[in-house]
Amino acid sequence: MASRDNERLIRVLKTDEVDFETTWSGICERQGTSSNGVDRDVRKIVERVRKGGDEELFALVRKFDSAKLERLEVTREEWDDACEQVDVADRAAIGKAAMRVRDFHRKRIPSSWEMREEGGAFMGQRVRPLASVGVYSPGEETAHPSSVIMNAIPPSVVEVPEIIMATPPRPDGGIRPELLMAARVAGVHRVFKMGGPHAIAAMAYGTELVPRVEKIVGSGGARVAVAKRLVFGRVGLGGEAGPGELCIVADRSATPAWVAADLLSQAEQEPGAQAILITHARALASRVRDQLVRRVRQLEREGIARESLSTRGVIAVTRNLAESIRLADAYAPEHLILAVEDPDAAIKMVNNAGAILLGHYTPVAVGDYLAGPNHVLPTGGTARFFSPLGIDDFLKRTSFIRMEPSKLRELGGDVIRLAAVEGFTGHGASVDVRLQKIRRARREREAAREAEAEL
C-alpha cells in the first residue's frame, strides 16, 4: 500500500533511462500559463483608473475588494492601533527579520564615482535613488509580512524618498495588523487600501489621492501580472515571481526526514509550486519517498501539497554528485539546497540559482524569513540571467562626460572615422565643426605669438 502511495505522490526519474534528457528538458522549460483570457478585462480596469482617477478607483475597490471605504489611505491612528494589536512575540520576530534584512542590504551600497584623464577628459557616474517606489502586497490569504519586509527594505536602505504600499482591504475596511507592522518596520511611508489591477494602475498613473511611483515591486495573481505588463514603460517593474521552486541536491549524508520536510515546505505553498530532489544515493531517494507519504498527512495544507507533488514533484536519481549538480544547474532553481557532506566544494560547481542554502542545517524557511538575503528571487529558470531583489533595483546610474578642447582634438579624428564606418556622417560633422574651431583658435594663438615675437 505504501509503495502505491509513493507512486501516486511523486514521480521518480533515473538518468540512465533512454528518454531522461528529453524529460528533464521539459521540466526545465516550465512553460507559463497563458493570460489571454484576462488581458481584455484587465486592460479595461487599467484604462478606467487612468482616465477616471479616484472616482473609478473607489468604484473598483467596492467591486473587486468588496469594501466600501471612506478613505483609501491608512490613517496614522489606524496604523498605530494595528501595530498595537500584534502579539508581542510576533512583533519581536517581525522586527528581528527586518533588522537582519536591513543589515544585509546595507553591506555594500554603490556610490557615485568620477575619473580624470590627462589631456582634459572628465567622466563618471552619478548614483541616485529612485524618487518613489510602490510595494504591492496581495490579498488576505496570500498576504505575507515577510514579503513586505523583503520588498520594502531595499528601497528604504538607499533612502528612496517615498515608499507606498497597496494591499486589498478586508470587507470591513481593515488590513491585517501584521502587514501594517511589517510595513512600519520596513520603512513604508504610506499604505493604501486597494488591490488587484486597479491598485497597479493607480500607482503607475497616479491619482489625486495616490501618488504616482517610479517602480512597482511585489507579486500578485495572474491579473496583477497582466496589469504590470500593461503599465511597464510608464513605471519600472520588479520581477514578477512565478510559482515557487525548490531543488535539493543530496548525497548519503542527508537525513531523509529533513529532505522530505524541506520538499513539503515548498509544496504546501501553492499547487503550482515545484519541489525536486536530485540525488545519486538510491537508498536516500526511496526513504525520502516514504517520509513524504508519512509527513504530508500532518500538514494543514495537505491537499495543496499533494497536488503540487503529484503534478510537479520529481525525484531524479543520478550516477554521481557532479551529474546531480549539472541537472540542478540546467534547471536554474529559485532555491537550491546543497544537502551534501561538503557543500563548500559543491557550491563552486553551481552557476545558476536564485539562492543557495548550504548544508544540512539551512532550510529554505530560514532564508524566507530572517537570514538576511532577499527572498524575492528569480523563478522559471530566469536565475540564469536575473538576480535576487536588492538595493541596485532602486538606484539609477547616470553617466557624465566632459571633454576639454585638447582632449576632443586628441580623440575627435577617431570619432569621425567610426561614425563614417557606421554611415552616420552627421555624427562626424558634429565633432568636425568643433575641431574646426579648435584648429582656428590654435592658428590664431600661433599667429599672435609670431606677431609678438616680431615686435
Image (cartoon, grey):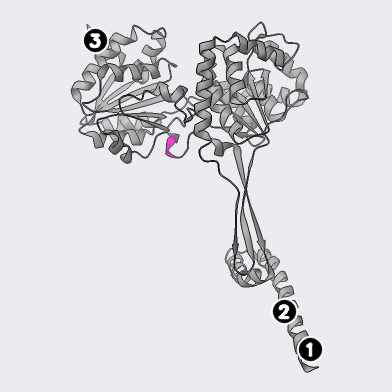
Up/down of 84 relative to 244, above or below? above
Can you tell which of label 1 and label 3 is closer to the viewer? 1
Magenta part, dominant SS: loop
Q: CA distance from mark 1 to mark 2?
A: 15 Å
Quarter of the image containing the C terminus? bottom right
**Marker disc for residue 4:** 3
Q: CA distance from mark 2 to mark 3?
A: 91 Å
**Marker disc for residue 353:** none
Q: Secondary structure at mark 3?
A: helix
Is residue 175 visible in the rendered structure shown here? no
Dot 1 and dot 3 residues touching (CB under 8 Å): no
Q: Give the residue type at disc 2.
A: Arg
Can you tell which of label 1 and label 2 is closer to the viewer? 1
Instruction: Confirm whether the magenta stretch covers residue 27.
Output: no
Q: Give the residue type at disc 1.
A: Glu
Q: Secondary structure at mark 1?
A: helix
Q: How far from the left and from the top, in percent, is residue 89? A: 51, 12
Q: Looking at the image, tell me whether mark 1 or mark 2 is earlier in sequence order.
A: 2
Magenta stretch, residue numbers: 383-387
Q: Looking at the image, tell me whether mark 1 or mark 3 is earlier in sequence order.
A: 3
Up/down of 192 relative to 215, above or below? above
**Marker disc for residue 442:** 2
Can you tell which of label 2 and label 3 is closer to the viewer? 2
Q: CA distance from mark 1 to mark 3?
A: 105 Å
Q: How far from the left and from the top, in percent, is residue 132? A: 67, 33
Within 10 angstroms of label 1, few (less than 14), some, or many (20 or more) residues?
A: few
In terms of image quadrants, where is residue 149? top right
Quarter of the image containing the N terminus? top left
Instruction: Confirm whether the magenta stretch covers residue 384.
Output: yes
Q: How far from the left and from the top, in percent, is residue 74? A: 70, 16
* Residue pointed to by mark 1: 452
